[in-house]
Amino acid sequence: MGSYLGVAAASANPPHFIHLCYKPVGGNVKRKLAIVGKGLTFDSGGYNIKTGPGCSIELMKFDMGGSAAVFGAAKALAQIKPPGVEVHFIVAACENMISGTGMRPGDILTASNGKTIEVNNTDAEGRLTLADALVYACNQGVDKIIDLATLTGACVVALGPSIAGIFTPSDELAQEVAAASELSGEKFWRLPMEESYWEQMKSGVADMVNTGGRQGGSITAALFLKQFVH
């Protein structure tokens, strides 16, 4: 899990990889799902430290919103006890700090599926933790994976503070999430996974860099995460 541990390396507080599992009473599992959440309990930005007006570094204790949603879902399922479905709740929790042991711009990390990542921005750390969490989720033999994350400011620029973006190559999954959003009252909007934008993510020394340019930043983040599911 070199990608996840690369992010965690600078903190004096150890990382915690959390895996909870709900299994239906009596077995008879018909579907297996995984819900993965970003769990950055504080994000300084690392060596690409958050600075300047609007950086909101004082709010970065909330960069674990995705993991909070995952644990909320785990509590809800434990109370509802749905039959026939097994659900894995996965969070790679850590801090993104600055120290002599921290990852540096230009470092090469190796994720648990063997793919290599050139770190060109230490403040694009959430996707590095999710990369290994998604590989782990795939290894549980699940049918579908949903990941939840406060991943990019670019998504907020596109959709504002009250609408979440959805990225998926699956029309079926997008329709299921849309139906759930209508029931819950939470707002979602599907955004395109434009494959041509992957050109921004190519590296001369690794399989990919961890962030592209300013344009289409939420799309390139989604394309990055796609490299870690199969």
Image (spheres, grey):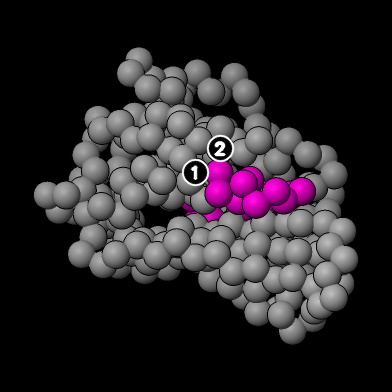
Check residue 228 in the rendering and tell me which mark sits there, or answer none: 2
Residue 68 picture location, percent across and down: 53, 71
The residue under the point 38% across, 35% down is: 110
Q: Could you tell me which quadrant the C terminus lies in?
A: top right
Residue in the foreground of this view, choosing between 183 and 15: 15
Residue 201 picture location, percent across and down: 45, 25
Residue in the foreground of this view, choosing between 94 and 42: 94
For residue 62, side relative to residue 11 (left or right): right
Residue 95 picture location, percent across and down: 32, 61
Q: Which residues are magenta?
A: 135-153
| Element carrying mark 2 | loop
Image: 163 above or below 209? below
Image: 30 above or below 185? above
Instruction: Check if mark 1's residue and mark 2's residue have beta carbons within 8 Å.
Output: yes
How dense is the environment of label 1, judged by Cα within 10 Å: few (below 14), some, or many (20 and up)?
Answer: many
Task: Tell me the kind of residue under disc 1.
Answer: Ala
Residue 49 appears anywhere in the view: no
Residue 1 picture location, percent across and down: 41, 46
Image: 228 above or below 34? above
Q: Residue furthest left?
A: 100
For residue 173, side relative to residue 166 (left or right): right
The residue under the point 42% across, 68% down is: 62
Q: Residue furthest bottom?
A: 79
Q: Which residue is mark 1?
A: 131
For residue 51, side relative to residue 175 (left or right): left
The residue under the point 35% across, 15% down is: 204
